[in-house]
Image: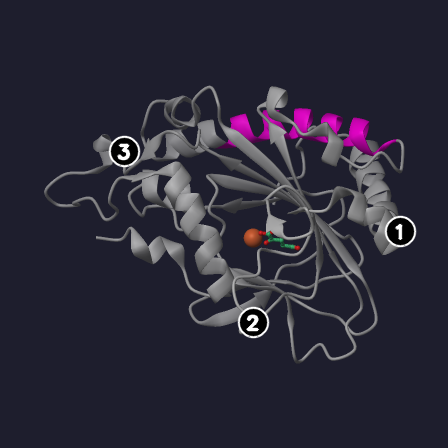
Amino acid sequence: QVTNHGVDTSVMDGMMVASREFFRQPPEEKQRYTNLIGGERFQLEGYGTDRVNSSEQILDWSDRLYLKVEPEDERSLALWPAHPQTFRNLLHEFTTKCRVVKDGLVRAMARLLELDNDYIIEQFGEKADTYARFSYYPECPRPELVFGLKPHSDGSVLTVLMVDDTVGGLQILRDGVWFDVPIVPHTLLINIGDQTEIMSNGIFKSPVHRVVTNAEKERLSLALFYSLDPEREIEPATQLVDEKRPALYRKVKVKDYIAGLFEHVSQGTMVIDTVKI
Ligand SMILES: O=C(O)CCC(=O)C(=O)O
Ligand SMILES: [Fe+2]
């Protein structure tokens, strides 16, 4: 959890208010930004649920808006809500500020690993992808039956997460036990993702987490997933591999890893297991 992050509270609050306003609109308004091309072919970006692969798949109790925010010249502005009017500017502001937070964090992580300060920054590459995922979890009449978001670890290098400051629901798995993540208003939660686990050769671990539903209250969160350039390959840093500690993960193309992630998330399995040696 970071507090002195430099992201203005007005931008944070504004972003939450604008997002809530977007999700509270009637379905036909939100459908303008649908993630189904021609009503059927799934694309990652846009409004809707995850890709549905089979009728057996267990869906999450949530509404999603997924937008690519970086590289900036790859934004699909047509999918960025035009209502409320403040939405686009706030998202631009929020991501600009969070980028600085992320840069500071990955430098600190590189130092902790005794790598070059800029080791992780350089791994990101010129065309590093950042996605924003807005998750809106409506009140759920039968919270014991369904997750807001199934157990998973993030496929990113790291995730910057802004959560509702009145309703909990995020839980993290530690030693086989689920713990509630406490809510501290105006902090940002930082989650280590699989790409850091791989680069650090397992020194950092990406935690498994989930969101439980709530019978009385809706909940909103915004996650920024910072990921390497999809065309690059990722592997443990050579400085962290030797005879005593061999590579624990094989080299993989980032794009393939992310594709695997969505496959596994829909089935409730862990993609990181596919690259473990
Ligand atoms: O809604 C939350 O608090 C968590 C969201 C999350 O874990 C994700 O989007 O990957
Ligand atoms: Fe997550």
Please give the residue where the numbered disc 2 appears in the rendered image.
55
Query: Which residue: 36% across, 53% down?
Result: 272
Residue 75 is at least partly visible in this image = yes
Q: Give the range drawn in magenta.
A: 86-105
Disc 2 and disc 1 in contact, CB within 8 angstroms: no
**Residue 232 magenta-highlighted:** no
Other residues around mark 1 within 10 Å, as few (<14) / some (14–19) / many (≥20): few
Q: What mark, if any, has residue 237 been given in the picture?
A: 3
Other residues around mark 2 within 10 Å, as few (<14) / some (14–19) / many (≥20): few
Query: Which residue: 38% across, 42% down?
Result: 256
Does the numbered disc 1 mark a residue whose Cβ is under 8 Å from ligand 1?
no
User: How many callouts does the rendering have?
Assistant: 3
Q: Earlier in the sequence, mark 2 or mark 1?
A: 1
Type of the residue with mark 1:
Gln
Placement of 180 over or under 18, stated as above or below: below
Type of the residue with mark 3:
Ala
Query: Which residue: 32% across, 46% down?
Result: 203
- Quadrant in the picture for the N terminus: top right
Type of the residue with mark 2:
Ser
Distance in Å between CA atoms under marks 2 and 3: 41 Å
Magenta segment, principal secondary structure? helix
Query: Which residue: 45% across, 56% down?
Result: 263
Distance in Å between CA atoms under marks 2 and 1: 28 Å
Please give the residue where the numbered disc 1 appears in the rendered image.
25
Q: Position of residue 241 (x, y in %)?
A: 19, 38
